[in-house]
Image: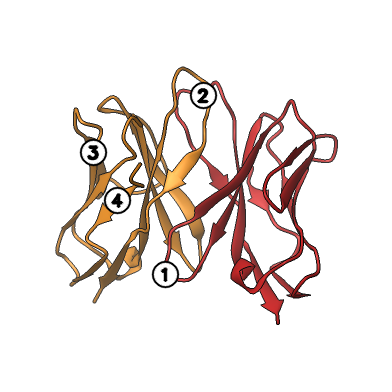
Chain colours: A orange, B red
Amino acid sequence: KAGVTQTPRYLIKTRGQQVTLSCSPISGHRSVSWYQQTPGQGLQFLFEYFSETQRNKGNFPGRFSGRQFSNSRSEMNVSTLELGDSALYLCASSFRQGRTNEKLFFGSGTQLSVL
Amino acid sequence: GESVGLHLPTLSVQEGDNSIINCAYSNSASDYFIWYKQESGKGPQFIIDIRSNMDKRQGQRVTVLLNKTVKHLSLQIAATQPGDSAVYFCAETASGAGSYQLTFGKGTKLSVIP
């Protein structure tokens, strides 16, 4: 099986712009999560989607949003970019059924630099 | 809020020796734990997981130990190799919640000395 695929691998944007990141989960996985990784804050949960529904959101401003499509692919969007949004954005997928958590697999991430 | 933390931020070991990476967690509701390895420029790679109904689980060259009494998790790597050099993260979550959300530790950098 192919792993979690994220595109693009690198992005450079300027303050005030918006960006959309894409994620294709492992085939058969319906749960898709997004995490932000920075040297200072480590790995922080952004949101999780399951069957096109956002089930939870981390402590991030409303500028961070996402969605999931019927094929489980997901996108996240950041509007009005700030310098502090520079980070590695990681997508992860899981074959989570019911209420039991299963292995969570990560993609290689999108490295976003805001200038 | 409750979080997962690591005792040692850096660890240097001689090639061939065993490595032990420790992790403390504070959420008593956590019942599922995962160890990840992250190499430079890559996403976290799943190593091994353990549920709270187990004390020990073994994989290929790796063993995870869970001590629920003191809320402590450890990852043991046998016969450490240069390819094991990376940052290791523990993560925890509680099943039964409406969402799957991992809380990560800050990470331990493992350096293997050839």
Q: Are marks 3 and 2 on the same chain?
A: no
Q: What amino acid is found at the position of numbered circle 1 in the picture?
A: Gly
Q: Could you classify mark 1 by the number of other residues whose Cα lies within 10 Å: few (under 14), some (14-19), or many (20 or more)?
A: few
Q: Is residue B70 visible?
A: yes
Question: What is the x, y in percent for residue B52?
Answer: 71, 29
Q: Is residue B30 visible?
A: no
Q: Are marks 4 and 3 on the same chain?
A: yes
Q: Secondary structure at mark 3?
A: loop
- Residue name at image x 49 percent, y 69 percent: A39
Q: How many marks?
A: 4
* Residue to which mark 3 is pinned: A73
- Residue name at image x 44 percent, y 60 percent: A37
Name which quarter of the figure residue B19 lies in: bottom right
Q: CA distance from mark 4 to mark 1?
A: 15 Å
- Judge left or right: residue A77 versus residue B40: left
Question: What is the x, y in percent for residue A103?
Answer: 51, 37
* Residue to which mark 2 is pinned: B97
Which quadrant is home to the C terminus of chain B?
bottom right
